[in-house]
Amino acid sequence: MSFFSTRGQHCVTASQAILRGIAPDGGLFVPAMFPQVSKEKLVEMAGMDYCQRAVSILKLYLEDYDIPEITGAVHAAYDGDKFDSKEIAPVHQLDENTYVLELFHGPTLAFKDMALQLLPHLVTLAAKKNHEHREIAILTATSGDTGKAALEGFRDVPGTSCTVFYPVDGVSNVQKLQMTTTGGDNTHVIAVKGNFDDAQTGVKKLFASRDFAEAMDKEGKVLSSANSINFGRLVPQIVYYFSAYADLIRQGAVSVGEPVNFAVPTGNFGDILAAYYARNMGLPIGKLICASNRNNVLTDFFHTGIYSTHRTFVKTTSPSMDILVSSNLERLLFEAADRDGDLVKVWMNQLSDCGSYSVGEQRLEWMQSLFASGCADDRETAEEIRSRFLHDHYLMDTHTAVASQVLGQYRKATGDDTLTVLVSTASPYKFAEAVLAAVEGQEKAASMDAFACGEELSKMIGIPVPRQVQALKTLPVRHTAVCEKDGMAKAVLDAFEK
Ligand SMILES: *Cc1c(COP(=O)(O)O)cnc(C)c1O
């Protein structure tokens, strides 16, 4: 399988796409075609464990990796006690026609682990295959969860380093502590005085800068990305949509071939894009419900066909979705443009020059046939957490609750009662203050710190506070660097000096 850039003809292998992260023309790598998975294969997958399912999907895309390599990487990522559920990504019934796909059982308690536990193995194999002897320097901007997941994934992996930028006031207390206490000799964490989009834009600029590449080369390093623009992050995410469907078959909840909907809390559009790729591969999916918080640029886009960042960035209780420029949307645009990279380039230039672009009526209709969309504000999100807890005895985090709320809106508006899988992207313990405030009121939560809130939640649901959160109480803070928006290049080079 070869990979193209969304902005032109550039053609590379899977391992090259993973190693580079982003195409030289600034576009994202996309597979030349979508390999097909038959109904028989879906039935077969129902009888497999998560690792076997992962190998069957990954091998379809990673053609220049051999099967033992893929199998080894998958086991290194998901075996052992890194995930606190044997099923890795378990599916629970929530109500009559809603199931939850829990993607937060990994080491950092958010769905990013699903990909970032595997990515380091794919990257180091890719380096070997392409005779890359320089250190692979991972550079990533995070709205909270990617950062920690990347640091955990790459920590002490030989031949790599991992540098993470986060918006100084844009992440939760637990998220910040998770990052700043990270161990390992090859990890760097830097706060940026700005919001997530500033951090992400800054990182994109570093990737595009020849001077910076030269400076890195002098240090014996070459840049790569752990952001969801890297195809190596996307492909492990495709796996859990197939896995969820296989579990529904196994549980007798669907008959093979019966379509299901997925409701996905969305920020950078990586998670839901993987669902769309799964659909293109033959997974029976009806609608993909794209849920946003008050940063509802995608909701407006799917309603009007106009993507516009002329709006105020809002800080919400679901910080991992506080994003105005959803990078992975570019891969959907590529399909909407019938794979015309020149057209995508025009839209992306309009976005960076004027802050908006429009895809036109016909392409909008095509997207609306696949995607529904909606948004929930903090109050609606809190009410959803409370009501799911009271009615379904299920405690969800703020991000998951945004999608759950939007799913309710969608069902009311359309009457579509198709079985729906709600994608749960984080553990409630990761956003304990907001979750406790939702259930027991602002006042109570405001009087406690994140750890005490976690203890309260634990009493409510009878599940102990995860050990990863407990440990944050005593781990020393190791990373304290702060930089200005335009000082990111220097901050990286300074970090390497230490
Ligand atoms: C990253 C993240 C999201 C958004 O996922 P995208 O792939 O960026 O759309 C949602 N919820 C949580 C908890 C996350 O960490």
Image: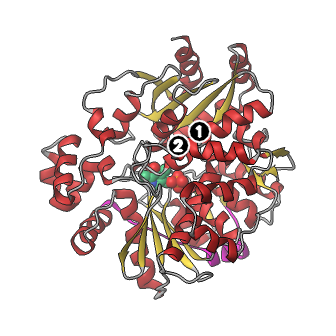
Describe residue 333's horizontal placement relative to residue 301 as left or right: right
Residue drawn at x 16%, y 54% as measured from the top left: 459
Residue drawn at x 50%, y 83% as measured from the top left: 418
Q: Is residue 50 above or below residue 150?
A: below
The boundaries of the magenta stretch are 358-379
Q: Which residue is mark 1?
A: 201
Q: Is residue 178 above or below residue 362?
A: above
Question: Is residue 344 among the parts visible in the rendering?
Answer: yes
SS of the residue under disc 1: helix
Describe residue 43's horizontal placement relative to residue 416 as left or right: right
Residue drawn at x 57%, y 28% as measured from the top left: 157
Q: Which residue is mark 2?
A: 197
User: CB of mark 2 within 8 Å of CB of mark 1?
Assistant: yes
Mark 2 crowdedness (10 Å alpha carbons): few <14, some 14-19, many ≥20: many
Q: Is residue 359 magenta?
A: yes
For the residue marked with disc 1, what is the amino acid? Thr
Rendered image quadrant of residue 61: bottom right
SS of the residue under disc 2: helix
